């Protein structure tokens, strides 16, 4: 059974506050990540290839990775896009439909730096470089804290807005803050989405629920080596014990001729 990994990035820039390293990745580090995965022979899948794999049983090459970005920061265009073009890597960016061209106001009043979000012009430009754009709700609300009507607004209205502004079908959604409940999943299915992306870590395979696809979180504290460990073990924070067990199993398999 083949398996694939989805990596989740946010801002590709320099952290302005120490604790921002949890979701901000330096451009140099992002370049090192992509370069190493390319060197190690990983196949960079598009989000549509993932869909075809899960829903239409089309095979993905071994060691497939999908690169995803949440929120749609302007620095995805300034810093990440040139690197993706350099290595010819497709990716998907999940946009907050109600805030295109504005700022990440969900951090308002907290000890975080507000950042510019992608404008429509930049989005259209990036679409020409194998970058897909999908949905990350209307206003980046915590869906599990909303009633049915509010959830529908965040999930359904965002789809309509993006389809109108981007002139394309919006088929995939990433849940803000990784939060969802059964109502969320029901609304997403009924709205016509084909896949939903969570923040649960782990590998994905053909039998994964397409509305709860797993992703590995990547940030500025992850060296290229640590990223490789994450991808190899399908975990956000693989321990030495995890690595030992993995290599022990590999050794036993070789001894037994498998």
Image (cartoon, rainbow, N blue to C red):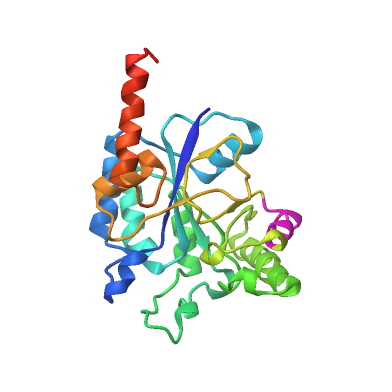
Q: Please give left or right for residue 224 compared with residue 215 in the image.
A: left
- Image coords of residue 135 (percent x, y): 58, 61
Q: Is residue 76 visible?
A: yes
Q: Please give left or right for residue 237 compared with residue 157 in the image.
A: left
Residue stretch rendered in magenta on the structure: 184-193
Q: Nearer the viewer, residue 217 or 26?
A: 217
Q: Is residue 247 above or below residue 85?
A: above
- Image coords of residue 236 (percent x, y): 39, 52
Q: Nearer the viewer, residue 202 or 41?
A: 202
Q: Is residue 87 above or below residue 22?
A: above
Check residue 190 for magenta coloring: yes
Q: Which residue in the rendered view is the most extreme toward the top?
A: 257
Q: Is residue 230 above or below residue 108?
A: above
Residue 152, picture quadrant: bottom right
Q: Please give left or right for residue 117 compared with residue 134 in the image.
A: left
The quadrant the C terminus occupies is: top left
Q: Can residue 41 be seen in this view?
A: no
Instruction: Please name the residue shown 49% across and 34% down the image.
Output: 3
């Amino acid at each position: 059974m083949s398996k694939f990994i989805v990596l989740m990035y946010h801002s590709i820039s320099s952290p302005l506050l120490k604790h921002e390293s949890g979701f901000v990745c330096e451009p140099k580090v992002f370049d090192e990540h992509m370069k190493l995965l390319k060197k190690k022979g990983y196949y960079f899948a598009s989000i549509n290839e993932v869909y075809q794999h899960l829903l239409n049983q089309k095979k993905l090459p071994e060691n497939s990775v999908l690169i995803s970005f949440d929120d749609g920061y302007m620095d995805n265009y300034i810093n990440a896009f040139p690197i993706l073009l350099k290595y010819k890597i497709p990716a998907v960016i999940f946009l907050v439909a109600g805030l295109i061209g504005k700022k990440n106001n969900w951090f308002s009043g907290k000890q975080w730096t507000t950042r510019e979000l992608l404008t429509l012009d930049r989005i259209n430009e990036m679409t020409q470089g194998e970058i897909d754009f999908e949905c990350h709700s209307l206003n980046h609300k915590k869906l599990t804290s909303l009633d049915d009507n509010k959830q529908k607004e965040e999930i359904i209205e965002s789809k309509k807005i993006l389809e109108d502004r981007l002139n394309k079908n919006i088929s995939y959604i990433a849940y803000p803050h990784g939060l969802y409940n059964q109502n969320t999943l029901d609304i997403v299915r009924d709205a016509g989405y084909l896949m939903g992306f969570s923040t649960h870590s782990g590998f994905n395979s053909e039998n994964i629920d397409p509305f709860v696809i797993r992703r590995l979180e990547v940030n500025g504290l992850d060296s290229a080596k640590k990223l490789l460990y994450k991808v190899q073990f399908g975990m956000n924070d693989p321990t030495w014990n995890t690595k030992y067990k993995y290599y022990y199993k590999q050794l036993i398999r070789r001894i037994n001729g498998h």
